[in-house]
Amino acid sequence: MSNQNKTLVRFNIQNVKYAMCNNGVYETPKSYGTSKKIALEPNSSKKDIFGDGKRICSLVSDKGKTGTLTTNNVSDEFEIAVGRKIKTQNGIAEIQQTKNPTFALYFETCGITEDGSKIVAKSWIYAATSSTRPSESFDQDEDDITESSFDTALEIGGVNLKTADGENYKDIKGNEILVWEQTVVPGDAGYETYGDEVVLPVMPAVAGE
C-alpha cells in the first residue's frame, strides 16, 4: 500500500468481481453481486529443526490462503463458470462438479486514515479456486423478515511476481516469489482503473537496467 497517509482502520466489503483464467490469461472481470463479508486465513505451518539439543533453524511452509466469501445471494453466472450449475431448457440446474477452474477475485474495502479521511482500498486475489458449492439455508419469516446469506469457500494459490520485462522475479538468494493478494489505495499507480482488469504483480524497473 501507499505510505502517503497511514490507514488506521479497514472495514466493509463491496464491488466483488471475478475473472476466470483461460489458458493462463484472465478474462474481463464480471460482477459477482452484493457481498457481506470476506474472511481470509493463512494456510501455513512451521517446523523447528533441532540439533545438539537446541533449535538450529525453522522451516516455514506457506501454501497460500484459504477463505470464505459471504454474499447476499448466489451468483448463478459464477456457479456456471466454475462448473457447478448449467443452463437447461427449463432453467438452471445444479450439477456434479467435475472441474476446478482458476479465477481472480476482486473486492474493495473502506478505511480511515490518520487525518480522518475515508478511502477505498482495491484488492485482487490471484489463482483462486472453489471446490465446494455455497451452503444454502432458507428460513420462514415470522415477526421480521429472515435474511439469508451464502458462504463460498476459496482456496488461493497465488501467482509469480514478475519483473518489468515479464520474467519471474527472483530474490538475492535465487528464490521465486508467489503473490497471493495485491492491494492499492488512492495515490498508487493505476488506482482509478484497478478493477477494470486483473492487474498482476510486477516489481518496479531498476534504474540502469
Image (spheres, helix red, strand yellow):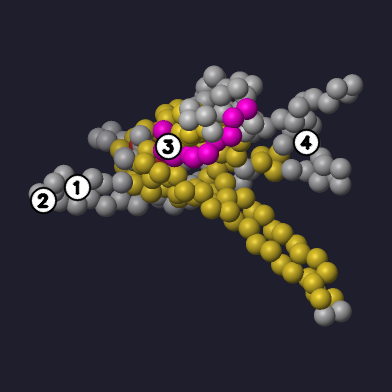
Amino acid type for the residue under numbered disc 2? Glu
Disc number placed over residue 168 in the picture, else none: 4
Q: Which residues are magenta?
A: 4-14
Q: Nearer the viewer, mark 1 or mark 3?
A: 3
- Tell me: 146 left or right of 62: left
Q: Nearer the viewer, mark 2 or mark 3?
A: 3
Q: Is label 4 in a helix, a strand or a loop?
A: loop
Q: CA distance from mark 1 to mark 4?
A: 50 Å
Residues marked 1 and 2 touching at CB (< 8 Å): yes
Q: Which residue is mark 2?
A: 142
Residue 13 sits inside the magenta stretch: yes
Q: Earlier in the sequence, mark 1 or mark 4?
A: 1
Residue 87 % position (x, y)? 34, 35
Disc number placed over residue 135 in the picture, else none: none
Amino acid type for the residue under numbered disc 4? Asn
Q: Residue at x 48, y 34 (%)?
A: 111
